Amino acid sequence: MKKTLLTTAVFFVMAVSAQQMYAQEGAKEAENAGVATKPYVQQISNLAAKPVVKKAFQTIVDLQSETLQDHKLLTEIPSPPYKETVRAKKFAEMIKSIGVDSVWIDNVGNVIALRKGKTGKKVVVLEAHLDTVFPEGTDVKIVTKGDTLYAPGISDDTRALAVVLTVLKTVNKNKIETDANVLFVGAVGEEGQGNLRGVKNLFSDKGPGKIDAYIAIDGTGLNGITHRGLGSHRYRITFKGLGGHSSGAFGLANPHNALARAIYYWNEAADKYAREPGARVTYNVGVIGGGTSVNSIPFESWMEVDMRSESPERVTGIDKMLQDAIQRALKEENAQKRLGPDLTVEVKMTGDRPSGMEATTTPFVQRAIAATSYFGTNPKMGVGSTNANIPISKGVPAVCIGSGGKSGGEHALGEWWVDDNGYKATQRALLLLLAEAGLAK
């Protein structure tokens, strides 16, 4: 009887747990699903039905081999972080040969091309990033195996650069005049320590001026729409002291001890914070270092940390916990020393990506959803750390969409890409651009 009751209880708990899990998954799917309302579906359908747009769609199909050629050419031009110049110059040259009103490379290395609209009352950006994560000296020669192309950076984000070029070729070949001005951009500094410096510059007083809508192309596939920016703060924290012999100088304040305390106190506070209801927040100690030998008190101890959330308030909250932990650790280690000078600490911010979000009901996001649905796929709404973070954080309508095809191994030497109906993503980019920039009347 006891066994029967126990078995029944176990099944009950399992059933409740499964029910909760399915409910959570269902809620997540509902949150991620993008649904466009009838007016926007109709707007996109009407636009796609126009003869000039139908012809433009066919042009994109006809340009597939040319798009692939551009893709391969740019992939094999190395573009390490902070060293995007060679690829930028070639990208600018390719844009100039297609034809725009003006093209230039700005003060940080962004390639910017202006195609004027009829009224120019609005400015819409179509952008892909020039940089890859791979350091100087990485072999970026493409290896082809069957229908798959292998090379570092081939999908992230070189494919998107080829899409930008093909969209420009398409509007030119079909003599499509937009109402708004369009900026075709190859941006620097999207990856890692680049800290979105390219797009930050676009929205600074050194940028091209007011921007009204922003389409970033990053990643692959056809159904993804990033409309929420995953913000992050990154730091390098260094505790510094006199250092000395482990026995002869015993009693000196030890930077490693302070670092260990700081990690412990931050983790204790941040773990509780991350479990609280609200927007998801993450934190990580990614790299630590310092010291010279096992029998030496180190003269410095350092760590690199990362914290993320789509909520600016949550990023600020977990950042304060880090700062408090650092100061508490410094104070306690200095109080414990028996001789010598106090430790000091250097806190250097190495990354600051703003966060933010747009409701799926905003007109620009609705157009993105409708344009994606038009191609027979279910739009998947998401959060990410992309160049779209900057305009989203500033209240400028923005999304990040994929460049088409299938890919894998991003940020690894074995990165690959397959052209699985990749042209449809280029058609989607064109359709969204025209929906926002407007066809001139």
Image (cartoon, helix red, strand yellow):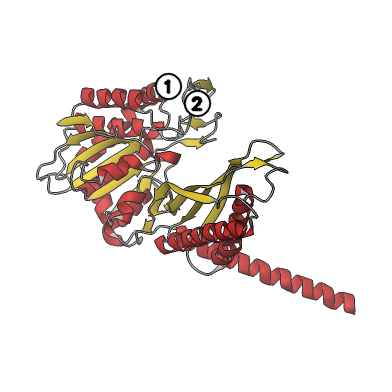
Q: Which x, y percent locates residue 425?
A: 37, 39
Q: Are marks 1 and 2 in contact (CB under 8 Å)?
A: yes
Q: Tell me: 194 left or right of 97.
A: right
Is 2 or 321 nearer to us in this picture? Answer: 321
The residue located at (27%, 24%) in the rendering is 94
Q: Tell me: 89 left or right of 192.
A: left
* Mark closest to the chain's N terminus, 1 or 2: 1
Give SS at disc 2. Answer: loop
Q: Which x, y percent locates residue 187?
A: 32, 36
Amino acid under label 1? Answer: Glu
Amino acid under label 2? Answer: Ala
Q: Which x, y percent locates residue 368?
A: 33, 51
Is 74 or 179 nearer to us in this picture? Answer: 74
Q: Is residue 7 above or below residue 253?
A: below
Give SS at disc 1. Answer: loop
Q: Which residue is mark 1?
A: 76
Q: Tell me: 294 left or right of 168.
A: right
Let me know if residue 430 appears in the view: no
Disc 1 packing (10 Å; few <14; some 14–19; many ≥20): some
The residue located at (64%, 41%) in the rendering is 244
Let me know if residue 423 appears in the view: yes
Is 4 or 131 nearer to us in this picture? Answer: 131
Q: Is residue 238 above or below residue 115?
A: below
Q: Is residue 116 above or below residue 308?
A: above
Q: Which residue is mark 2?
A: 151
Is 262 or 162 nearer to us in this picture? Answer: 262
Q: Which x, y percent locates residue 14?
A: 72, 68
Disc 2 packing (10 Å; few <14; some 14–19; many ≥20): many
